[in-house]
Image: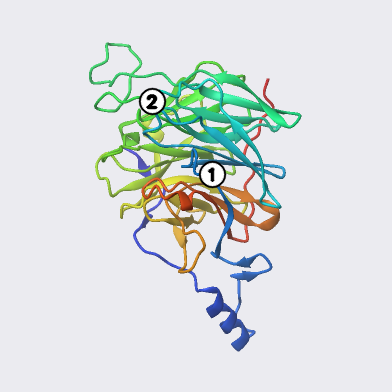
Amino acid sequence: MPHSVTSKSSHSNGKWLACGALALLAAVSPLIPGPALAQGGCYGEIKTFATVPAAPGFPEGIAVHGNRVYVSGPAMFGTAGQGPSKIVVFDRDTKIQKNTIVLAGETLADEHALSCIAVDDDGRVYALSTQLGLLRFTKTGHGYVQESYGDPLPDLPPCVTAAPGEACSPALFPTPPLPNDIAFDEEGYAYVTDSLQATIFRYPPGGGAPEIWFQSAALVGSGDVPIGVNGIRLDPEREHVYFSVSFSPSDTSLGSIYRLPLVDAPEEADLELVHDYDAGEAPDGFAFGKSGKLYVTLAAANAISVLDEDGVEESRIESAPGDEIPLDAPANVAFNDPAQTLLIVNHASFTANPAHFGVLRVWVGDKADPLEKPSLP
């Protein structure tokens, strides 16, 4: 069983004061500090960065490289017979859509989806396809060239029915692989979560076949859509791999952030609990800020939870009445460093409202802890 770093659980809101109230306080007394007001806006104030086309919709992944913002999708079930998966490319500063990368090679008559993305040192984009595996896209002229980088995740039998010595999944019943999130380490290994097979896989530098890096019954999901292990990132010290479990196997109302040491073969005893969400909030993707804070999307609570360096929730960011597009199943986040804003992918997976497909921005007065962008062959 995982052991806890400290005691930390969430079930309260801790909202920040509204911009107007802070402005009034600042006007009344110059002695009152005003950390929420700055040139970038008000802390927690949500605005629209860009909308995402309804076809294919259901965006999930996001990555920022230079002045480009990449957003991938669809991440959903029920795509058989629909159009191809896509990566939409926006200008970080003007917010204008600059390009659309259309995946080639999908069998569109079958289920197909595109989840999360990452970028290497050369600006090449890596994307997780349920059908095609780990793909790489290289910008050439005005377009992008697609190539296969890593094999699709294997379909593992449940360990309860697997033959002795056979690679298997901790899930109690047969489930297909569902690649979800990806994070590189400095050596070029790519860590990929499999949300239905309770497994974190690792691709070697240069790609190829994925290998099982860690498995545990704690990574199994529950509920109607049993999403278990989900988001994944390395900590600022590059000593641990952090990951989320959206729906605990023991209680669908429980979701957690865990961590493991960044070693070749972590063991069950190495698993540490960082934070529990116990009100059915469904923690999803997350990102570390330069401040050391962890910004966690809560898909079912339509909020961003901000954890301090000890894993204690210090605040939540939620939509306000009148927001052009409200938070709707936020999935993943990335930083726009010059603006000190957090870019949030609106997945809208529960409402399926196409008007909510997009990227939102919220001023947090923080920059990214830089993601590893290794130099790869």
Q: What's the amino acid at mark 1?
A: Pro
Bin the neighbour count of mark 2 within 10 Å (Cα to Cα): few under 14, some 14-19, many 20 and up: many
Percent of width and height locating residue 365 = 63, 61
Q: Nearer the viewer's eye, disc 2 or disc 1?
A: 1
Q: Which residue is mark 1?
A: 53
Q: Secondary structure at mark 1?
A: loop
Q: Nearer the viewer, residue 327 or 254?
A: 327
Instruction: Specify whether 291 is left or right of 180.
Output: right
Given contact means CB atoms under 8 Å apart, are the residues at marks 2 and 1 in contact?
Answer: no
Question: Residue type at mark 2?
Answer: Pro
Image quadrant where one finds the N terminus: top left
Please tell me whether residue 119 is drawn above or below residue 50 in the rendered image: above
267 displayed left or right of 158? right
Which residue appears at 28% of the width and 20% of the height?
Answer: 159
Residue 188 appears in view = no
Image point (27%, 11%), residue name: 163
Q: Position of residue 115 (x, y in %)?
A: 48, 35
As measured in the structure, the alpha-carbon distance from the residue carrying label 2 to the one carrying label 1 is 27 Å
Q: Which residue is mark 2?
A: 177
Identity of the residue furthest to the right in this view: 141
Q: Secondary structure at mark 2?
A: loop
Which of the pair 132/19 is nearer the observer?
A: 132
Question: For the residue carrying disc 1, how many other residues have a C-alpha within 10 Å: few (<14), some (14-19), or many (20+)?
Answer: some
Q: How is the image coloured?
A: rainbow
Q: Earlier in the sequence, mark 2 or mark 1?
A: 1
Query: Compared with residue 184, is residue 98 higher up or lower down, i.e. above or below?
Result: below
Question: Residue lying farthest bottom?
Answer: 28
Counting from the top left corner in percent of width and height, residue 323 is at 50, 65
Residue 66 picture location, percent across and down = 72, 42
Query: Which mark is on residue 9?
Result: none
Q: Is residue 100 visible?
A: yes
